[in-house]
Amino acid sequence: MRKILLFLLIISKFSIAIPLFCLSGNRNDDEIKTKIDEYMTRVEKNGFSGSLLVAKDGKIILSKGYGLADRERNIPVTNQTVFTVGSITKQFTGAAILKLQMMGVLNVNDPISKYFKNVPEDKKSITLHHLLTHTAGFPGAIGGDFQPINRDDFIELAMNTKLNSNPGKKYEYSNVGFSLLGTIIEIATGESYEAFLHENLFAPAGMMNTGYRIPKWNQDELAHGYRREKDWGTLIDKSWAEDGPYWHLRANGGILSTVEDMFQWHLALKTDRILTKEAKRAYYSPHVREGEDADSYYGYGWAIFMTPRNTRLIAHNGGNTIFSADFLRYIDEDVVIIVLANTAGQHAWNVSNAVAKIVFGYDYKLPPEKTEQLTIEELKKTKMGARALTLLQIYRTSDEGKTLNFIKENFETDYIERATEEGLLRFIQQDQKGIGDAKIGQVVKNDEHTLELTVQSKNTGEWWLISIEFEGKDPYKIINIGVVDTQPPIDADQENDNEDLSINWGLPSSNTGRRSAALLEAINRMDDAYSRKFIKTNFAPEFLNQFPLEKHLDQFHKMHQDVGKLELLGAMKTGMNSARIKVRSIESGKVFKIQIELEEHEPYRIVGISVASDE
């Protein structure tokens, strides 16, 4: 998962954040350490759990754990606790490809047809460079993280998947592309993906606690993930193959590590031990803009930001709906911040942003000892609340004139000058697309000058946390806004999803059977209104949030086009919460395999669907 809006796959999103660029030079390391520890102790009291490492000029300022790695056994998090780093894995895959290029084994400009047989015509022009930069045209995902699938079947499934755009034409963040790079590493070397990384990246960097299966961790070292009070377990408790995750996750995510090991990786990349200077130029090069209006670029497994001071931030984050990780490397200032977290809703990037403010000498606020929940009526009675409600109204429109007027009337003058009207307009326009019309689920007053609104988009059903900071005196204008995806409030109304599950198609009334039946009905009906309702009702938030609702609908159009009216030939379970369904198109007579995977907890919604010809 990058810090972007779509994947989560995904997905989390920030907006209107003033970049943190340079050290003030007025604060010593001991003072920075004390302030960071004070801040982290406060967020720990508010529910954060994870590890943090902060270093400057190659020297560790603070490396420490907060909260619990295993609540049942009361095992605390330390700087040696093992977490998944999620999509940060992509930088290891990128480095492995460049390592093989250094060895003369392959070239990033090679077409994938050099490594795969029977590549379809629409994919013959795809190169390794396209896969590395998310420009091959593949969708974000073609199956769930824990859906069992071997290497050859994954390659076949990817080759049979329709591209969303022509190769090289458009950036679209794709786990599929990086998993294909992992298969190429294995084909080119004759080794397993993890074995090659261990021998050529991790061991030379001194990272002996990083990998999938090779490190022999004991249970006390592994962080459990938590969604509210529920123990999600560890990543390796899930459905994995003997040598690591299955291929919907392998090489694009799932690597396990510690903050100390990740710091060793940072140090190794500062030398030529792993990659030559020439290879690192390609590694960090801003190859492609991350979206048409994005200020960031993508390298080979890294996002690259240029600050107004012409200094570089090279970063990546990752995670699933439970674990999260953030890795920030301010290259020119030689500052690194690494955060690994294990609690849903307490994202690593929220912590890393605040820690960066402390390191760089910017103003920051300690989280409150106690928060206060407000009603909508209470919100309306204050100037801060009125501005927050007006912001939600602005999210509902796409009128540029109204948006600019809102910026001029509601943002503090100095903030407008720093961020510029154009910059603020661009960020708000992103939120207008992502959030749109929203209902408020919860309002929290963190302190005298900060409000947090948890809202649900009526278009997509996804939940967002909007944090608004105001100036400390009348007229209380806005001085900062942050937006991130989040979990629904505990007491939020949950949509009744039973209606779409009533048609059984002769399938069993199990979780998998009912969702599979609802999917078949949606494909068979070819009705947009029904399909939209099915998507909103049956997709898990992390799957729904991979793309805007209309993009998901486009995928249903493709399924309708391929399959049309269908008849069920058979179905079999492929895991505790997954199934393979075989159907025949009544119109063409062609047979198709539909793979469906559900989340591993109630309400067992869909996290992966793939359709492939069985001929």
Image: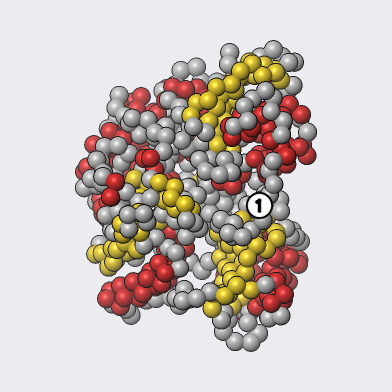
> Which amino acid does the dot numbered 1 rest on?
Gln
Residue 482 in sight here: yes
Q: Label 1 belongs to which residue?
A: 494
User: How crowded is the residue under tag 1: few (<14 C-alpha within 10 Å), some, or many (20+)?
Assistant: few
Above or below 31: residue 7: above
Where's the C terminus, which quadrant?
A: top right
**Which percent across, then down, holds residue 242?**
33, 30
User: Dividing the picture into quarters, in which one does residue 16 lie?
Assistant: bottom right
Question: Helix, strand, or loop for circle 1?
Answer: loop
**Which percent across, then down, holds residue 356?**
40, 67
How many dots with numbers? 1
User: Which colour style is shown?
Assistant: secondary structure
Q: Is residue 450 left or right of residue 387?
A: left
User: Dividing the picture into quarters, in which one does residue 25 lie?
Assistant: bottom left
Q: Identify which residue is drawn at 60% across, 87% down.
A: 473
Above or below 528: residue 30: below
Q: Identify which residue is drawn at 28% across, 74% down.
A: 29
**Which percent across, then down, holds residue 253?**
42, 42
Q: Identify which residue is drawn at 66% across, 29% down.
A: 517
**Which percent across, then down, holds residue 295?**
54, 57
Q: Identify which residue is drawn at 43% across, 58% down.
A: 348
